[in-house]
Image: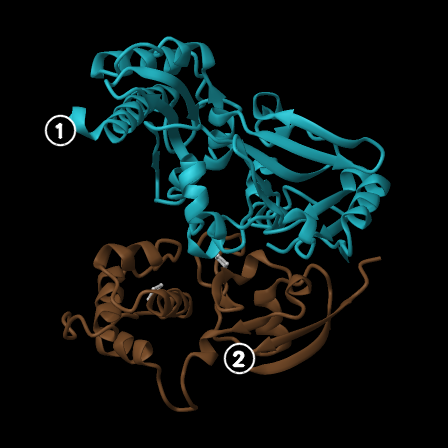
Amino acid sequence: MKAAPFTFHRAESLDHALDLLARHGGDCKPIAGGQSLVPMMAMRLARPSVLVDINRLDALKARHDAPDHVTLGAITRQRDMEADVALRRSVPLIAEALRWVGHVQTRNRGTIGGSLVHADPSAELPLAAAVLDATLVLRSQNGGERRVPASEFFVAPMFTAANEAECLTAVEWPVWAGAGVSCAFEEVAIRHGDFAMASAACQIQLDPDGTCRRATIGLGGVAGTPLAFPDLAQRLIGRRITATLAQEAAEEAAARSEPGTDMHADAGYRRHLAVVLLRRALLRAASAATPALAA
Amino acid sequence: MTAPISVEITVNGTVRRAFVEPRTTLVDFLRDHLALTGTHVGCEHGICGACSVLLDGAPVRACCLFAAQVDGMSVTTVEGLAPARGELSKLQDAFLESHALQCGYCTPGMLIACTDLLARNPQPSEEEIRDAIGGNLCRCTGYQQIVDAVKLASGQEEAAHG
Ligand code: FES
Ligand code: FES
């Protein structure tokens, strides 16, 4: 199908875009990669009457490396993040998640910000943001800048804490300093690159003897938002990540999920996948962090 | 209200200027305004890959972009892959040799995806080839011959499946 008619503006500056958003409210949508928005418009699930193209705003491409976090401009392309060797080192979970995101054609256009504001509960980058508790920087003409942690950003399927006048400008990703950090992202989808039936992600830091010093875990596709489980992750601290411990954590996490049923999979199967995938993610991350112990 | 937008887009090396309705997708612009019907359109919402073109050298889905967004950029369509009229690119020739097309619906998108792959990676493994065409559906399901064609074009295999 074709999109409903709309008025098109090329934003000359961030203020120009924010002004249009302030004036038109919910009828106005920023567009960058358009890999979620254009299909939604084609299916008439979205019918904004004003589109503001933010692709040329250098302010939204800025990259900043600090010791404890990396700031990525909202319209950083997925393909550029994938190829970014420094980012792979500082925030490895992004590259792990991107292995499952779309296809070359969509990653060439798709942006980090677009994926997060679209907030599909099965999407990979929102899960990565939830697991690392990234910070989303929002800006509006009247409200100025507002910083929202991922734990508060994702509210419901396709629904976030951003209001209609706000534009996501950047995302801050925590960097875990020190040795022994590793992460894993696991997923099952109908076709590689499609949205997940269920997905799991973790990042851990192990001491040289294999004891877990820091951990975060989460599940995607099994609730209205991506889920992170800080309290369950806390229980891994001070212990070795054995198959038994990974299974326990995965079972408890999956028990808290609320998967839906659709033509691809029922709730029970999704919950089963959640257990398998989270256990697998934890064990893969653990063996990557301590190759010597695993050998 | 939905005032036409002026665009200047370089298509297969030729600068094209036009006024487009904002909701005109790039694939509709190519097919309906420029009569370049080599680029196919299947699902119109980013699933099938039939509409793939190179945008500033990188493969994208032309149904998921509005022509107005492409102003100032350059597009290569399947018509732009051949070195000259009446000739075929090495990859196109390998598709022919390997029987990599049946109905031909997916072919323009497959050629764009594989042209990009070979430009980045002249000797791709079978897995890398399959990954590169992961976003392109062939409703005739002739994937194996497409993989063979890419191997042939990259000098890795004789034309096999006859
Ligand atoms: S027509 Fe563009 S992806 Fe199907
Ligand atoms: S050859 Fe028919 S769709 Fe691929």
- Chain letter of disc 1 in the image: A
In terms of secondary structure, where does tag 2 sit?
loop
Instruction: Find disc 1 in the rendering and name its residue.
Output: A295
Observer-nearest residue: A179 or A35? A179
Q: Quadrant of residue A204?
A: top left
Taking the spot 62% from the left edge, 43% from the top edge, the residue there is A74
Number of residues whose C-alpha sits closer than 10 Å to that of mark 2, classed few (under 14), some (14–19) or many (20 or more): some
- Tell me which amino acid carries mark 2: Asn
Q: Is residue B23 above or below residue A253?
A: below
* Number of numbered discs overlaid on the protein picture: 2
In this rendering, does residue A161 appear at all? no
Q: CA distance from mark 2 to mark 1?
A: 54 Å
Q: Is residue A157 above or below residue B75?
A: above
Would residue A74 appear left or right of B86 to someone viewing this image? right
Quadrant including the C terminus of chain A:
top left
Observer-nearest residue: B43 or A282? A282
Instruction: Find disc 2 in the rendering and name its residue.
Output: B12
Number of residues whose C-alpha sits closer than 10 Å to that of mark 1, classed few (under 14), some (14–19) or many (20 or more): few
- Tell me which amino acid carries mark 1: Ala
- Chain letter of disc 2 in the image: B
The brown-tinted chain is B
Would residue A76 appear left or right of B81 to someone viewing this image? right
Residue A226 x %, y %: 49, 25
- How does the figure colour the protein chain or chains? by chain
Would residue B126 appear left or right of B106 to someone viewing this image? left
In terms of secondary structure, where does tag 1 sit?
loop
The mark found on residue A136 in the picture is none
Q: Quadrant of residue A229?
A: top left
Taking the spot 41% from the left edge, 35% from the top edge, the residue there is A93
